[in-house]
Amino acid sequence: GLMDQLAGIQQREKRLSEFLEIDRCLIVSGNCDEQVKVIEIMGKLVNDTLQALLPEGRNVIAVMGGTTMARIAACLTPKVAEKRDLLFVPARGGVGEAVDIQANNVSAQMALRTGGKHRTLYVPEQLSEKAYEPLMQEPSILEVVQLIRGSNAVIHSIGEAITMAKRRDMSEESIDELKRKRAVGEAFGYFFDEKGRIVYKIPRVGLQLEDLANMKSVIAVAGGVSKAKAIVAYMKLAPRQTCLVTDEGAAKVILKE
Ligand code: BG6
């Protein structure tokens, strides 16, 4: 019956969080590789999770870009903003994505959906070392970077290494290097191998992996059979307080069911 089914889901969620060594996993049925609708159900869960996790009052929420994040943004509701002041910021400067899935856009969408505010990070895609320094002295940029690094919550996705490298127009040489170093996943612009060792980093301003340790709530949203390997690899370096919102497609592969 329904109760058995529910108990089964909870057990699998527990097994997955134990396996990945993180606080919490939420698994929706289906495989988002095959059904885009599955991402909407994950989006509803993200909406619920934010309501449950965020403290009352002021919250600064750093968000990443990507197709998953763009779809999650569309699922958020004003409920998240009840008794709270929400400020959404992009977690990192541009990492070579199409405008509609850039972190700046995702954070603006999340603010729009919840009734919160947002700040934009105006940092160009290609930046030389020489241009970087003076830019970081700009009060308007520095201010947003400080907001990002001091945020209390982060929402992000996880990608497959080579897929993400190609989407971000990385050079042939860099892609070959990633292959040689056996990169399997990418998150926040960091590429890592199966063991969770960082093998490459896109140099960009904003959130750094070490900032995650101080974040109260970290929500990772990634599903689909195709992302199973990347999820496992990333969770080796993810902070314990991560809550993973995923689907059966990924969960079954990870748990070898
Ligand atoms: C972003 C992450 O949120 O999602 C990236 O920060 C990741 O690092 C990307 O690669 C995945 O994109 P997509 O389109 O598969 O959701």
Image (cartoon, rainbow, N blue to C red):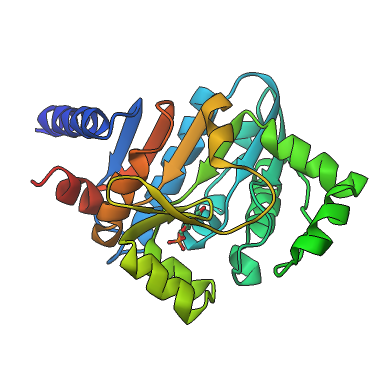
Relative depth, front residue between 97 and 128? 128
Q: Nearer the viewer, residue 10 or 251?
A: 251
Q: Residue furthest right?
A: 139
Residue 248 at x, y percent in the picture: 22, 48
Q: Report which quarter residue 3 is drawn in.
A: top left
Q: Foreground residue, 124 or 119?
A: 124
Q: Is residue 171 left or right of residue 225?
A: right
Identity of the residue drawn at 53% across and 50% down: 188
The residue drawn where x is 28% and y is 41% is 27
Residue 130 rendering spot, x and y as whole percentages: 81, 62
x, y (%) of residue 242? 42, 32
Q: Residue furthest bottom?
A: 172
Q: Can you tell which quarter of the image residue 6 is in? A: top left
Q: Residue at x 59, y 42 (%)?
A: 208
Q: Is residue 77 above or below residue 73?
A: above
Q: Residue at x 54, y 76 (%)?
A: 169
In this rendering, the answer to whether 209 lies above or below 52 is below
Residue closest to the far top? 56
- Quick one: quadrant of the N terminus? top left
Q: Relative to residue 31, is residue 160 drawn left or right?
A: right
Relative vertical location of residue 200 with respect to residue 141 in this rendering, above or below: below
At which x and y percent is residue 18?
23, 27
Against 55, residue 200 (above or below) is below
In the displayed structure image, the side of residue 97 where residue 237 appears, left or right: left
